[in-house]
């Protein structure tokens, strides 16, 4: 099946739209800031999107929904959805959203305003205090009436949306799919990761010998998937393959040999009918934790030649959890289109145990195939391969 990305947009601390993100990458300008999340005194850096602070949504109010709305309004995503609704009918479009927290930010606030032990009127929001909230809200926002699902597989959530969307198209369930991901900063997330001793007091340094932990951020991203043989054969970038696995090794620690991650990469390559040496660039999961970067780096070194360039882009906006998959997949897609590989920002000295082709600086290079890796808690893994149209 020829699956195309008709359009895509990304919103994060590195830029509220694709144009801003490109500018941040080109200038190697990070969107991280010292932690200023209300109610938190953790000494760390975060990727907060301040533009969502004053967005009012009434009965749909939550920070997560506000960021979903902000992202949906960027570029031509909304206009393209409207055009596809006219072409196919709203019921023939689907929605697949990825998130790890949904609107837990709103639930935290609701518990701070309990009245006699119960939710007050303003916080009785059944469609918000709900793991499925992202897709419910995006359906409300877009007017799409076809199937809608929310995927929650930790940090691989919004990478898996591409695989699900592609299967829906191949099965003829829909004629176009709005895939996306959104996650926002909240106290549960920030203090939860701090309790795992994963949060750094410094700006994160993925793959660096001196890395000492992650920074957390928030983001939303969208893409529209269509079939190339439905009149879109000259459109966009192609989704060539995907691989999904769950090794279930540990709740938060990756498998020491990266077995599930390896299986996901092998599946993605096999579906794409590509050899490892044909992959020009891999956007690594690269969280900047000691274990993740070492295990992923060793695995990539064992599977790919030195001609495959790699980098982690989390130093631009932080680890955006359930939105990381789509954020970094779209960075890889845009690298393919522009011929600019983002550097691994803040990399001063590569981990001594790694032998991979990575640079702190951006690199101009003509490419044909790129991969994006997303590895989540519980061993939930997803790898995506994209190719030129």
Image (tube, rainbow, N blue to C red):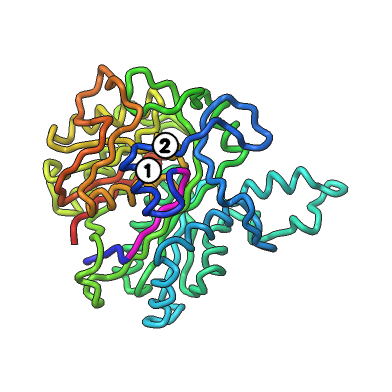
Which residue position is annotated with label 1?
24
Q: In the picture shown, does residue 199 fall above or below 265?
A: above
Residue at the image point whose x is 43% and y is 44% from the top: 14
Q: Position of residue 297 (x, y in %)?
A: 27, 29
Q: Nearer the viewer, residue 16 or 117?
A: 16
Confirm whether the magenta stretch covers residue 351: no
- Magenta residues (range): 7-13
Q: Quadrant of the C terminus?
A: bottom left
- Mark 1 vs 2: CB contact within 8 A: yes
Viewer-closest of 48 and 278? 48
Residue 78: give x, y in percent of width and height: 45, 69
Q: Earlier in the sequence, mark 1 or mark 2?
A: 1
Q: Position of residue 1 (x, y in %)?
A: 22, 66
Residue most extreme to the right: 116
x then y, percent, for residue 29? 39, 37
| Residue 277 seen in this snapshot | yes
* Secondary structure beneath label 2: loop
Q: Which residue is mark 2?
A: 30
The residue nearer to you, when weighing 246 against 4, is 4
Q: Nearer the viewer, residue 289 or 315?
A: 315
């Amino acid at each position: 099946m020829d699956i195309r990305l008709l359009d895509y947009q990304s919103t994060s601390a590195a830029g509220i739209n694709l144009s801003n993100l490109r500018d941040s990458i080109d200038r190697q300008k990070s969107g991280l800031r010292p932690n200023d999340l209300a109610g938190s005194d953790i000494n760390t850096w975060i990727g907060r999107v301040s533009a969502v602070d004053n967005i009012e949504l009434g009965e749909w109010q939550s920070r997560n929904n506000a960021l979903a709305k902000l992202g949906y309004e960027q570029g031509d995503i909304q206009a393209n959805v409207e055009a596809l609704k006219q072409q196919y009918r709203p019921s023939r479009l689907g929605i697949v959203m990825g998130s790890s927290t949904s609107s837990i930010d709103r639930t935290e606030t609701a518990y701070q305003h309990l009245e006699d032990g119960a939710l007050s009127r303003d916080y009785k929001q059944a469609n918000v205090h709900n793991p499925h909230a992202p897709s419910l809200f995006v359906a409300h926002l877009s007017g799409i009436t076809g199937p809608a699902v929310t995927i929650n597989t930790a940090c691989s959530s919004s990478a898996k949306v591409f695989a699900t969307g592609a299967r829906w198209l191949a099965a003829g369930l829909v004629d176009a799919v709005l895939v996306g991901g959104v996650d926002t900063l909240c106290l549960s997330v920030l203090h939860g990761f701090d309790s795992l001793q994963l949060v750094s007091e410094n700006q994160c340094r993925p793959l660096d010998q001196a890395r000492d932990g992650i920074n957390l951020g928030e983001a939303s991203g969208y893409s529209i998937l269509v079939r190339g043989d439905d009149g879109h054969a000259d459109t966009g970038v192609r989704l060539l393959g995907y691989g999904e696995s769950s090794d279930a090794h540990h709740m938060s620690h990756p498998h020491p040999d990266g077995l599930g991650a390896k299986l996901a990469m092998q599946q993605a390559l096999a579906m794409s009918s590509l050899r490892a040496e044909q992959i020009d660039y891999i956007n690594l999961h690269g969280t900047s934790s000691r274990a993740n970067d070492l295990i992923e780096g060793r695995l990539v070194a064992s599977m790919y030649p030195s001609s495959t360039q790699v980098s982690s882009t989390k130093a631009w906006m932080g680890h955006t959890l359930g939105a990381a998959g789509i954020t970094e997949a779209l960075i890889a897609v845009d690298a393919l289109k522009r011929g600019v590989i983002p550097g691994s920002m803040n990399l001063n000295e590569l981990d001594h145990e790694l032998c991979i082709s990575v640079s702190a600086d951006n690199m101009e290079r003509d490419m044909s195939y790129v991969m994006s890796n997303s590895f989540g808690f519980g061993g939930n893994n997803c790898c995506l391969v994209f190719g030129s149209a």
